[in-house]
Image: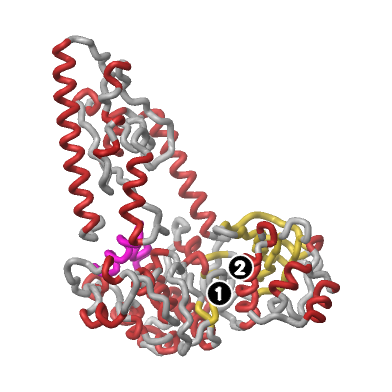
Amino acid sequence: MGKIPKATEAEQVAAGWPSWLATTAGEAIKDWLPKRASNFVKLEKIGQGTYSSVYKARDIVRDKVVALKRVTFDNQDTESIKFMAREILVLRRLDHPNIVKLEGLIISQASCTMYLVFEYMEHDLTGLASRPGTSFTEPQMKCYMKQLLSGLDHCHSNGVLHRDIKGSNLLIDNNGVLKIADFGLSVFFDSQSTVPMTSRVVTLWYRPPELLLGASQYGAEVDLWSAGCILGELYTGKPILPGKTEVEQLHKIFKLCGSPSKEYWNNSHLKHSASMKPPQAYERCLRERYNDLPRAAVELMDTLLSIDPAGRGTAASALNSEFFTTRPLPCDPSSLPKYPPSKEIDSKMREEEARRQRGVVGGKNRTIDSETKGLKQSRVVPSAKANPELVMSLLRKQSRSSSTCSYSLVSKRTSNSGPITQGPRFPKSKREKHVSTIPSEYLTSSGSIEFASYKHVEEGKRVPKPESSSKDKSSTDELIKKLHRDQLGSCKLEHSKASALIVS
């Protein structure tokens, strides 16, 4: 991002831009004037990201509903400002019916906060697809895919990679028009450039295999992979590659799309190719998996989800595929149904309310047995953003740091909300032998410990108070020893599974 002359910077400050913004992001705000915050009224929050929030608002001067993306810069951090300036530059360069339009900027001088003013879109694809009772027709799905690929073609033709194509970033208005939004991870690219780029982009479920393997040289094909995932999601009604970790994500990709050829492994020189190479080769089975879908849809999905980036073609070639010329043809956006506003945040709120309701019901009727059943299937799962080579160390660290909560017999929440059911209590003299106090040397694997199965727990009966007879002490000692052996064996088994990249 080039620097602007000092005179221009002074003019921008005089026009109302803060000096910290003019100094760092002068090129991004060139020839623009800041909008007045007093001209906008927030109506409701409609989105939440890692670094920003999105609000529905009214522009009282134009009497128009808009979307405001709020970004705060901590202590006027230069890198954060440059990051936002890049997004503004990208949005100002792009001008297409299928790309969201940036209408202006609002600056709060006192709080180092910026609002990006966008046209308001009633829906996003994730929110719309997850709305109860909503189902898309095939002409509708083709209409959405045509608009997505048209927007991507414009981005790539102007040297821009989006790098975060997913349903919640595809906005749809009440006229059926789809627009690509959220260019926070976008970057300008040149196919001839050798400047390395980060592989830590694209939401996990839509991330291509080369990025999971650590590629630093890539191009438009990363967005096309994500588009292929969207296509599969439209037809199946659910994400087609929902991995929990980078290791599992790559494993799911290989199982569906086949593992790369020997030549690819030898020539790609990818950062994680040695550690992430599967112990066995996988055959591609995408066509067989989706043989109940229309042939033209499977053909396009098969191309976009090519394991070799060079095989994905371009957005322009995808637009010329048979998918868009075979019947039923894509419908006109204006003919699509009108829906109540549907955002991803609405979907999350419905899911949270459903979990809360289940928790209320479960809290009234839950027994120790139901808690134990949920715990038997629990696993220690690393963050989806963890580096592949750090997965094992992270799991071990979690095991060591959570011996009293992760390995407690029954005092742990299940995936549903609700009250915690108190587990059996032991006298102080015997508490040190309770399963939840197993020494950390037994917890060196990545897997979760199998939980003890007691007859009185499984039957939901009250836990009898232990008596301090020598016979009980002897049987308790034997039980603890057995638990230690079983749990250590379980740990070793999980460790071997993780090492073999077999992630269930």
For the residue marked with disc 2, what is the amino acid? Met
Find residue 179 and name its label: 1
Number of marks drawn: 2
Question: Observer-nearest residue: 327 or 408?
Answer: 408
- Name which quarter of the figure residue 174 lies in: bottom right
Q: Which residues are magenta?
A: 235-255
Would residue 302 be seen by someone viewing this image from the given angle? Answer: no
What secondary structure is found at the residue carrying circle 1? strand
Q: Quadrant of residue 434?
A: top left
Mark 1: give few (<14), some (14-19) or many (20+) Cα within 10 Å: many
Q: Is residue 349 above or below residue 257?
A: above
In the rendered image, the quadrant that contains the C terminus is bottom left
User: Which mark sits nearer the N-terminus, 2 or 1?
Assistant: 2
Query: Is 82 situated left or right of 279 in this image?
Result: right
Residue 88, position as x, y percentages in the image: 64, 74
Q: Are marks 2 and 1 in contact (CB under 8 Å)?
A: yes
- Residue at label 2? 121
